[in-house]
Each structure stands twice: as structure tokens, then as C-alpha cells.
Image: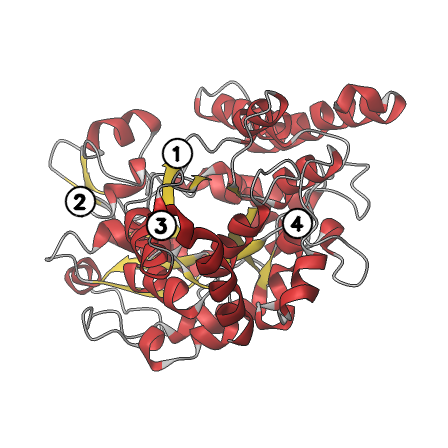
């Protein structure tokens, strides 16, 4: 692209002096410690050999805010949710990228339109500030073990299953020994943060349109909670927390979800990013299908953006790195590695993404693209910190497994507790700071 060439020439002229004895330029990149980061840095250094890129893995939003308040801003940092992006935008610590986009002639239409909720303030591409650039994305899919399906006599899904079809398949795929101990589970229980997707699939929502009310006490939401919990409590096709800990292999990137990698569970609802781990098991014969649905086909979209602090010391260098992260070379490097799909739609439609001969079993990558039609970004409320909302959800869901409350009661409790915080913060907005 023309803007990449112009930027490269400017930066090479600026940084070339490092070879003549001046201090080597450094760029601190705050992002998770995914093993692909070293390769991304190597690729950047092929363009800018005089720049030392430091991968700082302490990427939590509170940690970054502490760095910003302390006057030691990162040069580029990752933001993993629209909720966190809204927090940084509200504190006015992000560089608005609109002037940079105009300066370098960047076509923002190259990104999947579903990513607007990550990229733009308030998700509004017509009025909102550009908060950052995404370098990858992905929808949740159903991943399944083909060998286990064959052995159980369960036909592989050729289209999206309903919840009922999914549950019946999970029952057939669950195996117990003569003592009643489960030796193979039908599914790894979807994490509680995916409840929002299941609520959507029943026609409900997590918040109302303006985020002033949490609505998971509605009947549609309660039905989603009940189905989700039934996989573990009623049908016993998903491991309990204790069973997960006992079965999960030690180490690896992905935590208890690596039960699928270890062939302890036949199905899992997650994203392409975990194929990074599963490829390590050469005997694992897996494939993908659309995520199961309730009344409506709806999926959840994950992504992250890379942002530049307003207080960054070398914004020219920071933006050069940002442009690198959305270049075809870098996005395809990440996609080849298995970490989601490119954020630039055109890159997803290349032969290189649709079928990588290095991984011949992954022959249905086109399904990642077709699922984008149903993808939504997580809802947010401007009146509650995401950490508070997440903590409430996890606490109430844990009480389900302790048999203290029913799934419907958990949904009602979440709504009650979240709405109490929303009312408090609306009455005194200073509490949000």
C-alpha cells in the first residue's frame, strides 16, 4: 500500500541515525505473551532493523492505566474488549487516530464492518474517534473430535445444530466406565462469559439499548441460563469444576479448554485461536461447525485493538508499528499461526487463509467467514466497570455449581446486583473514575 511505503521511508530516514551512534529507538508493546509475538517483532524488524521492540505481557487495563498515570506510557498496547476501550476513551488517554488515518490515506473500510464496536468510540464510524486498529478477530464456533464422533456413531454436523441436537449429541459422546466414572465428556462447558451469546440466541439481551438496565432477569435470559447449566448439572455431559481440574493437562495456552486437546472431551465452543494448542497434538482429528443456537442464529465476535496513548513519546514510531500490525504480511502471519482470522476482510478471502496446505485437516476455514454474518459484539453499559460486571457474573454462576441457587436465580441476582451499581453510578458519575 502507498501509505506503508511512505511511512517506511520516513521512519528509515528518522531511525537510520541509530547506526551512527545515537541511542537505539525502543518501542514497548503491551500485549499478551502469545508465542507468535516474537515472530511479529521479527517481521517488523525486517522493515525497521534499528528499532528494538519490547514485548511487555502485563496487558490488563488497570495495569496500563497505572503506567499512564505514572508517566511511563507504553508505545502501543492491546485493548481486548469494547468495554475496556470505552474505559480508556472516557479517561481521554487514547490518541485519536483519525488525523493519522487521513494523513496516510488509510481506508478504514478494509476492516470487517462487524468490528466497528471495537474500532470506534461508541461503535459509531461516522462521529466516533478511532480508538485503535484490530489485527485479528474471530467468531465462536463448535469444534469437535471426528474420531470420537465416528466411534459414538454420531453424524458430523453439516450445518448449525440447535441446542437440542447439540445436547443429544453430547449425551451420546459421553462415556462412563463400569464404576460410573466419566472417562470422556461430550463437551467442555462453555465459559460463563458466553452466556451473553446464549441469551441473544433466545431473543434476550444483557443490557437495554442505552445500557441503563441489565435485563438478564427476563424469561429469555433465564431460559439460556437453564440450558447452559443443564449441560453440567442435569445431563452431566460437561465436567464439574473438580473434574475439570483433575482432567486438565498441566501447562499450555488455553487452560481447562485444553481438555479438548487432550481428547478428554468431544466438543468445545471456542474460537480459532485455540487451534494454536490443538495443532500440537498431531493425532487430534478435529473439525469445525457453526455454533449451536437456541431460537435464533447469533454468534459472538471477539477481537482486540491496538491503541496509542496520547502521552506516547514517539507517536510516529508507534503508528508505524500499528500500520505494521494490520499489514497483510503480519495479519497473515498471525492467521497462519492459528490465532483467529484477519481483521481485514480481503485477507480472509485469500487462498492462503481458506486452505493452508501445512494443515490439511483444516479444510473448512470458509465457515469462519460465513459465521461473520451472525456475529455480534458484546453489549456494554457506560454505567458499570466491566470488571465489576464480570465479577458479579462469575460469583453468581459459581453459586450454581455450589447448589446454592438455581440458574434462573443466578440470572435474577446478576440483574439485581448490576442494576444497583448502575443506579448508584448514574446518581453520582464521579464514582466511575
In front of the other: 157 or 393: 393
Residue depth check, mark 2 versus mark 1: number of the one nearer the observer: 1
In screen coordinates, is 83 left or right of 22? right
> Which residue is disc 2 drawn over?
262
Image quadrant where residue 102 sits: bottom right
> Which residue is disc 3 drawn over?
50
Please tell me how crowded label 1 is: few (under 14), some (14-19), or many (20+) other residues with Cα within 10 Å: some
Kindly check if marks 2 and 3 are in contact, taking CB atoms under 8 A apart as contact: no
Marks 4 and 2 sit apart, C-alpha to C-alpha, by 39 Å
Marks 4 and 3 sit apart, C-alpha to C-alpha, by 28 Å
Marks 1 and 4 sit apart, C-alpha to C-alpha, by 21 Å
**Residue 224 image position (x, y, % from top left):** 57, 45
Question: Who comes first in sequence, dot 3 or dot 1?
Answer: 3
Image quadrant where residue 245 sits: top left
- Direction front: furthest residue: 20
In front of the other: 69 or 148: 69
Marks 2 and 1 sit apart, C-alpha to C-alpha, by 27 Å
> Which residue is disc 4 drawn over?
131
Checking the image for residue 57, the label placed there is 1
Which residue shows up at 18% across the image and 70% down it?
Answer: 358
Q: Locate the C terminus and report the quarter of the image it occupies.
A: top right
Checking the image for residue 351, the label placed there is none
Q: Secondary structure at mark 2?
A: loop
Residue depth check, mark 3 versus mark 1: number of the one nearer the observer: 3
Residue depth check, mark 2 versus mark 3: number of the one nearer the observer: 3
Question: Who comes first in sequence, dot 2 or dot 1?
Answer: 1
Q: Secondary structure at mark 4?
A: loop
Amino acid at each position: 500500500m502507498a501509505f506503508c511505503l511512505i511511512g517506511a521511508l520516513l521512519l528509515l530516514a528518522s531511525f537510520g541515525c541509530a547506526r551512527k551512534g545515537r541511542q537505539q529507538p525502543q518501542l514497548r508493546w503491551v500485549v499478551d505473551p502469545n508465542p507468535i509475538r516474537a515472530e511479529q517483532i521479527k517481521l517488523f524488524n525486517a522493515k525497521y532493523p534499528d528499532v528494538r521492540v519490547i514485548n511487555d505481557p502485563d496487558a490488563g487495563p488497570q495495569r496500563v492505566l497505572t503506567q499512564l498515570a505514572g508517566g511511563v506510557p507504553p508505545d502501543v498496547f492491546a485493548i481486548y474488549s469494547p468495554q475496556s476501550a470505552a474505559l480508556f476513551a472516557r479517561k481521554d488517554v487514547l490518541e485519536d487516530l483519525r488525523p493519522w488515518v487521513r494523513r496516510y490515506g488509510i481506508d478504514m473500510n478494509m476492516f470487517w464492518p462487524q468490528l466497528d464496536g471495537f474500532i470506534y468510540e461508541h461503535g459509531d464510524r461516522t462521529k466516533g474517534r478511532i480508538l485503535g486498529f484490530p489485527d485479528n478477530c474471530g467468531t465462536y464456533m463448535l469444534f469437535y473430535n471426528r474420531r470420537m464422533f465416528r466411534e459414538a456413531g454420531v453424524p458430523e454436523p453439516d450445518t448449525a445444530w440447535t441446542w437440542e441436537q447439540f445436547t443429544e449429541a453430547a449425551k451420546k459422546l459421553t462415556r462412563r466406565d463400569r464404576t460410573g466414572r466419566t472417562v470422556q465428556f461430550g463437551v467442555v462447558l462453555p465459559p460463563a462469559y458466553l452466556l451473553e451469546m446464549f441469551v441473544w440466541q433466545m431473543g434476550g439481551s444483557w443490557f437495554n439499548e442505552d445500557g441503563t438496565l441489565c435485563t438478564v432477569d427476563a424469561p429469555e435470559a433465564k431460559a439460556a441460563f437453564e440450558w447452559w447449566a443443564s449441560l453440567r448439572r442435569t445431563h452431566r455431559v460437561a465436567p464439574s469444576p473438580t473434574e475439570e481440574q483433575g482432567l486438565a493437562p498441566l501447562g499450555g495456552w488455553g487452560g481447562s479448554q485444553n481438555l479438548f486437546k487432550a481428547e478428554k472431551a468431544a466438543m468445545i465452543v471456542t474460537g480459532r485461536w485455540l487451534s494454536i494448542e490443538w495443532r500440537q497434538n498431531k493425532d487430534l482429528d478435529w473439525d469445525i461447525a457453526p455454533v449451536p443456537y437456541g431460537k435464533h442464529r447469533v454468534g459472538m465476535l471477539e477481537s482486540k485493538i491496538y491503541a496509542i496513548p496520547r502521552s506516547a513519546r514517539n507517536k510516529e514510531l508507534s503508528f508505524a508499528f500499528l500500520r505494521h500490525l494490520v499489514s497483510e504480511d503480519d495479519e497473515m502471519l498471525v492467521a497462519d499461526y492459528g490465532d483467529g482470522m484477519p481483521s481485514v476482510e480481503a485477507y480472509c478471502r485469500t487462498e492462503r487463509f481458506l486452505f493452508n496446505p501445512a494443515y490439511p485437516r483444516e479444510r473448512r476455514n470458509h465457515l469462519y467467514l460465513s459465521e461473520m454474518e451472525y456475529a455480534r459484539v458484546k453489549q456494554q453499559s457506560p454505567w458499570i466497570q466491566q470488571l465489576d460486571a464480570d465479577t458479579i457474573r462469575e460469583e453468581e454462576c459459581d453459586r450454581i455449581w455450589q447448589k446454592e441457587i438455581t440458574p434462573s436465580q443466578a440470572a435474577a441476582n446478576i440483574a439485581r446486583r448490576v442494576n444497583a451499581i448502575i443506579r448508584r453510578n448514574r446518581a453520582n458519575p464521579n464514582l466511575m473514575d
